[in-house]
Image: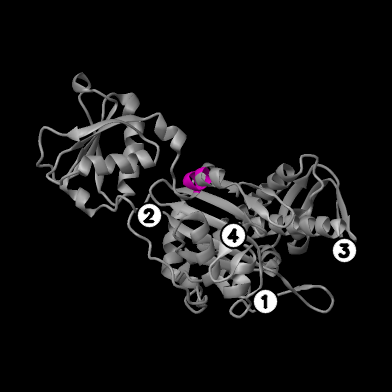
């Protein structure tokens, strides 16, 4: 029994590595294809299953749930395309992807398939079962409840998508520093990649991301995964790829579905092309491996979700001292905004009434050039509450604290206890 459990865990880890690489790559590929929408008019990209999800509010981060389902195999054990419209199997891995249009930051949180969660209507179960019970809709509801974040879109794929996309791109060249050899009789798997420069087609690239015999364990696998993804992205964004778009789009539909329409994809793609790679952060859900489940560390999860999916860095915010002044006639505005900012970790020294109470617009002033960045962080947090805000330079001779918030009548638009 112990051996079977160990073997199962090893296979789950290999599948996780595969899907972390393939799904992120496929999502970015979808964005690139959407950016060339004229090539896709006859393809119908975005024909996923109907799901009930919230609309993206102004200033809100865009959250996408990436779903990797179990691969289908033919009689010879070869990976074959699944009918994604009807395939409600367990997920191998889910990844929450959160994009901030205001900062161009992208956070990715990998959710182990065995995570202990509450699945609405089914009690406590492994996270992988949510999709099997109710497809993308129940998977979205489960993850949204578990992480306390809204989910606006989903992208779903399978093993075959990774192989196919690498082959359509013509493969990728990568330097391998050490001989990679691994055998797993339970899967009839043999990986044998000598050191040196190699051209990887889809099948070989699949071997590369499944290999796990690194001296530093998961760290080594993540590094190799990142190298492969970067090499694939170089292929995606080269000029010559435009001639492959029609065949790529048609092939992609066999392996991917999503509730995003081409217009939404186009909007994301236009922003993604301008993204700084250094602003992409990926982590795994905090927890530990128990006898049956991946046991979540709920205290650490709050901090991780805040940073990756909500754009809240409590440690940084705690170092920003500010005051909040009510500059309008909305009773209790300063106390309400102070509570909302303190909830995000900001060090609000004091709050009260401003000398003038006829301000229509909220603004943040900073006192001294060194406080400009801090003022920007405060302004961003306020804008996420639904309040339009501007940043202005303040007078240092009157400064009590580095940053001052003066509330205008537009605070009436805010949802203080809602969006963060």
Mark 3 Cα within 10 Å, few/some/many (few <14, many 20+)?
few
Q: Earlier in the sequence, mark 2 or mark 4?
A: 2
- In the rendering, which numbered label is found on residue 60? 2
**Residue on which disc 3 sits:** 186
**Residue on which disc 4 sits:** 117
Q: Which element is circle 4 on?
A: strand
Across and down, in percent, residue 237 comes to: 56, 56
Q: Earlier in the sequence, mark 3 or mark 1?
A: 1
How far apart in space, not on screen, are marks 4 and 1 (Cα)? 26 Å
Query: As drawn, is 104 to the left or to the right of 407?
Result: right
Q: Earlier in the sequence, mark 2 or mark 1?
A: 2
Query: As drawn, is 341 to the left or to the right of 6?
Result: left
User: Which residue corresponds to the image point at 40% horizontal and 66% vertical from the top-left?
Assistant: 54
Q: Which element is circle 2 on?
A: loop
Query: Foreground mark, 2 or 4?
Result: 4
User: Which residue corresponds to the image point at 38% horizontal and 65% vertical from the top-left?
Assistant: 55
How far apart in space, not on screen, are marks 3 and 2 (Cα)? 46 Å
Q: Would you say the residues marked 2 and 1 are in contact, meaning their CB atoms lie under 8 Å apart?
A: no
Q: Which element is circle 1 on?
A: loop
Determine the main secondary structure of the stretch shown in magenta: helix
Give the camera-side residue of 97 and 243: 97
Mark 2 Cα within 10 Å, few/some/many (few <14, many 20+)?
many
In magenta, the rendered stretch is: 303-308
Across and down, in percent, residue 182 comes to: 87, 53
Mark 4 Cα within 10 Å, few/some/many (few <14, many 20+)?
many
Query: Foreground mark, 3 or 1?
Result: 3
Residue 196 shows in the view: yes
């Amino acid at each position: 029994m112990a051996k079977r459990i160990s073997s199962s865990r090893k296979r789950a880890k290999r599948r996780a590595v595969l899907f972390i690489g393939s799904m992120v790559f496929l999502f970015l590929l979808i964005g690139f294809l959407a950016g060339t929408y004229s090539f896709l008019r006859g393809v119908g990209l975005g024909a996923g299953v109907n799901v009930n999800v919230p609309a993206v509010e102004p200033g809100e981060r865009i959250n996408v749930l990436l779903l990797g389902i179990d691969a289908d195999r033919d009689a010879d054990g070869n990976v074959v395309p699944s009918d994604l419209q009807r395939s409600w199997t367990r997920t191998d891995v889910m990844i929450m992807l959160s994009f901030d249009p205001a900062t161009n930051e992208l956070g990715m949180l990998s959710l182990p398939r065995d995570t202990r969660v509450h699945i609405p209507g089914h009690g406590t179960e492994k996270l992988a079962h949510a999709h099997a019970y109710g497809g993308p809709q129940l998977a979205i509801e489960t993850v949204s409840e578990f992480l306390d974040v809204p989910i606006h879109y989903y992208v779903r794929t399978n093993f075959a998508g990774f192989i196919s996309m690498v082959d359509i791109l013509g493969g990728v060249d990568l330097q391998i520093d050490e001989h990679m050899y691994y055998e797993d009789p339970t899967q009839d798997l043999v990986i044998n990649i000598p050191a040196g420069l190699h051209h990887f087609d889809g099948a070989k690239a699949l071997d590369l991301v499944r290999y796990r015999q690194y001296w530093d364990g998961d760290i080594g696998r993540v590094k190799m995964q990142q190298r492969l993804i970067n090499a694939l992205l170089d292929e995606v964004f080269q000029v010559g790829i435009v001639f492959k778009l029609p065949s790529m789009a048609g092939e992609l539909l066999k392996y991917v579905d999503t509730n995003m329409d081409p217009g939404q994809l186009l909007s994301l793609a236009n922003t993604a092309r301008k993204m700084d790679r250094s602003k992409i952060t990926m982590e795994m859900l905090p927890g530990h491996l128990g006898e049956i489940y991946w046991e979540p560390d709920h205290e650490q999860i709050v901090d991780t979700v805040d940073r990756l999916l909500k754009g809240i860095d409590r440690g940084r915010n705690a170092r920003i001292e500010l005051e909040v002044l009510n500059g309008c006639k909305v009773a209790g505005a300063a106390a309400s905004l102070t509570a909302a900012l303190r909830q995000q970790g900001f060090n609000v020294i004091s709050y009260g009434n401003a000398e003038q109470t006829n301000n229509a617009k909220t603004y943040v002033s900073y006192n001294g050039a060194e406080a400009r960045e801090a003022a920007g962080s405060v302004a961003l947090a306020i804008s996420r509450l639904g309040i339009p805000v501007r940043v202005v330079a303040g007078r240092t001779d009157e400064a009590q604290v580095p940053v001052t918030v003066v509330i205008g009548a537009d605070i009436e638009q805010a949802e203080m206890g809602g969006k963060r």
